[in-house]
Image (cartoon, grey):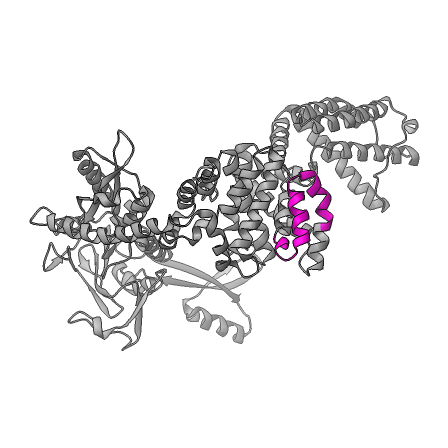
Amino acid sequence: MSDLLLELFSEEIPARMQAGAARDLERLVAGALSDRGLLFEGVRAFAGPRRLTLAVAGLPAKQPDVREEKKGPRVGAPDKAVQGFLRSAGVRLEDCETRDDGKGQFYVAVIAFKGRATADVIAEFLPEALAKLPWPKSMRWPQPSLMPAGSTPSGGNAPVRWVRPLHSILCTLDGEVVSFTFAGVASGNKTRGHRFLSSGEIEAKRFEDYAKKLRAAHVVLDAEERKAIIFEGVKGAAFVHGLELIPDEGLLDEVAGLAEWPVVLIGAIEDQFMDVPPEILQTAMRTHQKYFSLRDPKTGRFANRFALVANMVAEDGGKQIVAGNERVLRARLSDAKFFWDQDRKVPLHRRIGDLKNIVFHARAGTMLDRATRIALVASLLADILGQDVVNAERAGLLAKADLTSGVVGEFPELQGVMGRYYAREGGEDDAVADAIAEHYKPLGPNDRVPTAPISAIVALADKIDSLVSLWRGGEEPTGSKDPFALRRAGLGIIRIVLENKLRLALRLPMLAALAADQPLADVAWGTRLREALSSATLLMGLAEELKERARAADRPADAQIADKVMAFLADRLKVALREKGTRHDLIDAVLSLGGEDDLVRLVARVEALQAFLKSDDGVNLLTAYRRAANILKAEEKKDAIAYDGEPDPEGFAAPEEKALFVELATASELIKAEIARERFAGAMGVMARLRRHVDAFFEKVTVNDKDAGLRKNRLLLLSRLRAVLHTVADFSKIEG
């Protein structure tokens, strides 16, 4: 068995592209080998600042021989048909075999393909595979200008696409060079080590030799090993100063892609910058300089030290490197401190008016419009949930104000965080300040949900407004695009509601968000709407008028948009619940009843239904439902009528059907009462008691009786059974 070694050596590859490029290279090469019958024992891909490497173990020396049979016309067929078959198969008649299938003899062309040498196959497909490597961004350059001496151009001056100029290709199979040319670079068995800590070319034939020589040339090939070196190095260096690392997995991944031979050094932050909020310091160091932040493990306070990762072993132990980085950091932090000092001169509430200069969306208004909508929806939610309406409205109005600050302009990732600082500087209530900081949460599936009442309300208002305003603006997500992250907003709404167990009907605040931009153009309506927003009851009374105003403004009906957004949330809810083991068909069964926009209540119903269907009573009742539904479907189709009326209690003959009728009447009222009290397990218990009566009915009673009156009454009884069960869920949606 043979081993393949492939390395593509280039100028620096952006760190964010390295891991994906390694996976794509592995996928393309492994796929091409498998497609050509070259099976292998294992494959490993590596990525670093200047090289992509692939090691494939256990390849055969050549492709397997292939024998293919092609059936032809029968013996004695017209000559034209026989000659056409021979041409298509590429054989002569004397090379064909004859077979007998019991109906007569026919020709069979036996085509044998000898397996080619693996090296030849690899040399043939590699240039094509490398050309397909899907870089997020790539460069083009004329081939001859960057060709190593002695290489042969292919394609003349045609520009080549690659992430950065390609310098060399190392490709060997079982120690021998696999010869091919890509991007004007001919393959060989040589590479280079660290840019500064090594010199000259390195010759390598096999992976073990290659990895060993690279390490001797100050190159750590494996990205995971580089990450471990950096992590342990920062921990150890911080410990010497009595500090600890502030974890930052994303920065660790990035820095591991910047240094082939990582060396950790510690620098100092000047005291003049230590009164700047730590979030600003950490973001400035992380974003611009790729420095790790440290803290005091005893107090948890941000430390006046930072860790940097050099790609160099310095003779002076790194003193000059640290000094140079400290000078650069001083300039960066001076800018950050200037913005911080300037921002504090303007109270947060005085920044609200400047939001009119920031466009949220061409068809959804400015950030001032958005802040107004969020404030109105937040006040409504606070009233529904029995929370502080004034604080909710205040937090909603101020939530986006920090977008006009210098710090957020320089570091957009600090929006919300800086709003909390500015709010506290301006004397706002702590609940308002915290809500401003947390209203963007959750930012993803692993981010925490805000739990403080005002924070949860404003976060909910923000996401509701995003959904409905952008939906009305024509930005609803599709299967291939979601530029405004509305799916994330939808999952955020679901998580906030469910994890905080917020009892509210979501359609109502959606209607409020859809109408909340109209006060800007209609003062009278704005006054009425603000009054209405202080009471959920009043707003419910205005719902129809809100729809009429939307139509009068030549917009899609608010109710229609709210329905579409609720359907969108229902799909997101299915995704969220499926991940927790809830059956999607049960979610459909409950949602199909319509009118349910209280997510907490909906999930409770689904969970109760799932528990019921795991019991014997549930399984048997579902079977009986299907039997009843199938009978009704068949008879309604045959009779061309719908059996959906009430059966006549005087028209029953058998005691079993009379008993079932009485039980259904009782069960119907009990189920409705239990659902109204949200005792869904109790509703399932009522359904369970129907089981024996339904079983007895199907065992003793013939539905399609010869007597037309009895038949009709029994079909109406089955229809009544279906209707009672549909009070809980649409059982026709349940699978299994």
Q: Main secondary structure of the magenta part?
A: helix
Residue occupying image coordinates x 59% and y 44%: 377
Residue 520 spot, x, y in % from top left = 61, 55
Residue 569 spot, x, y in % from top left = 59, 44
Specify the quadrant that holds the C terminus.
top right
Number of callouts in the render?
A: 0
Front residue of 2 and 531: 531
Q: Which corner quadrant of the image does residue 4 belong to?
A: bottom left
Side of 529 relative to 65 (left or right): right
Above or below residue 660? Residue 440 is: below
Side of 677 relative to 450 (left or right): right
Q: State the residue lying farthest toward the front.
A: 345
Say if the magenta span includes residue 306.
Answer: no
Residue occupying image coordinates x 31% and y 51%: 19
Write the start and end of the magenta stretch as one range: 517-545
Residue 52 spot, x, y in % from top left = 26, 56
Residue 404 spot, x, y in % from top left = 43, 54
Residue occupying image coordinates x 59% and y 54%: 471
Q: State the residue lying farthest toward the bottom.
A: 156
Say if the magenta span includes residue 530.
Answer: yes
Inspect this view and state whether residue 241 appears. Answer: yes
Q: State the residue lying farthest toward the left.
A: 315
Front residue of 32 and 8: 8
Q: Which corner quadrant of the image does residue 156 belong to?
A: bottom left
Front residue of 16 and 473: 473
Side of 292 relative to 340 (left or right): left
Inspect this view and state whether residue 287 appears. Answer: no
Front residue of 390 and 158: 390
